[in-house]
Image: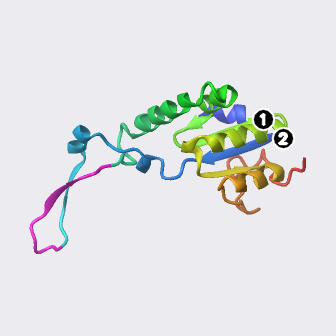
């Protein structure tokens, strides 16, 4: 994580993305569901019955590994089409967050738009440049308010940077 933040710091144009409901997007194999059994009852007067989770649970020990393996599997699909972005995503991911940066706006814009084309990154993206932020809105990302923009490393970033 420290290496990721240090690399992020050195770029003047910053952008982040969060995979929305990342763990819940991964379905458990039928054989693995028996390990996620739990008791449930609709009424305290009735006997409980057994249910199984069908999705990866946030908080279980193997969950971060399953998420990382799933994301890397999806990234490999686009390795030929977007090699530059593929390398960046593989080195700039922390659990379900992408923490990236670029030296200039055109490169950052290209990278963010390519990231939006990855099906797994269609979530919440934000950037410290208005040109990039406005283009991200076209791909379904939310406009980030001045109060909420890039609070990842507050002393370093200035969300009002003009390009």
Mark 1 falls on what kind of element?
strand
Residue 76: image location, x then y, percent: 54, 28
Residue 160 picture quarter: bottom right
Q: On the rendered structure, is 39 left or right of 138?
A: left
> What span is in magenta?
43-54
Above or below residue 6? Residue 158 is below
Q: Position of residue 51 (x, y in %)?
A: 20, 55
Q: Is residue 125 left or right of residue 135?
A: left
Residue located 72% across and 37% down the image: 111
The answer to whether the residues at label 2 and label 1 have Cβ atoms under 8 Å apart is yes
Count of labels in the image: 2
Magenta stretch: residue 50 in it? yes
Q: Main secondary structure of the magenta part?
A: loop
Q: Residue at x 78, y 35 (%)?
A: 102
Asked which quadrant contains residue 143, the reply is bottom right
Work out how far the residue at label 2 is from the one at label 1, CA to CA, in angstroms: 7 Å
- In the image, taking residue 64 as reference, residue 8 lies left or right, namely right
Question: In the image, which disc is placed on residue 105?
Answer: 2
Q: Nearer the viewer, residue 19 or 117?
A: 117
Residue 40, given in percent of the width and then of the height, sits at: 19, 62
Residue at mark 1: 102
Q: Quadrant of residue 110?
A: top right
Residue placed at 40% from the left, 36% from the top? 66
Residue shown at 63% from the left, 46% from the top: 17
Kind of element beneath mark 2: helix
């Amino acid at each position: 994580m420290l290496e990721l933040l240090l690399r992020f710091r050195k770029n003047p144009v910053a952008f982040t993305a969060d995979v929305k409901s990342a763990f819940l997007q991964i379905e458990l194999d039928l054989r693995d569901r028996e390990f996620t059994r739990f008791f449930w009852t609709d009424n305290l007067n009735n006997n409980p019955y057994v249910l199984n989770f069908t999705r990866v649970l946030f908080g279980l020990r193997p969950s971060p590994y399953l998420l990382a393996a799933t994301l890397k599997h999806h990234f490999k699909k686009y390795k030929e089409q977007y090699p530059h972005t593929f390398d960046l995503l593989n080195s700039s991911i922390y659990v379900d967050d992408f923490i990236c940066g670029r030296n200039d706006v055109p490169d950052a814009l290209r990278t963010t738009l390519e990231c939006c084309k990855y099906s797994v990154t269609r979530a919440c993206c934000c950037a410290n440049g208005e040109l990039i932020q406005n283009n991200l809105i076209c791909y379904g990302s939310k406009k980030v308010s001045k109060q909420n923009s890039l609070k990842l490393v507050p002393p370093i970033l200035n969300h009002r940077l003009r390009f």
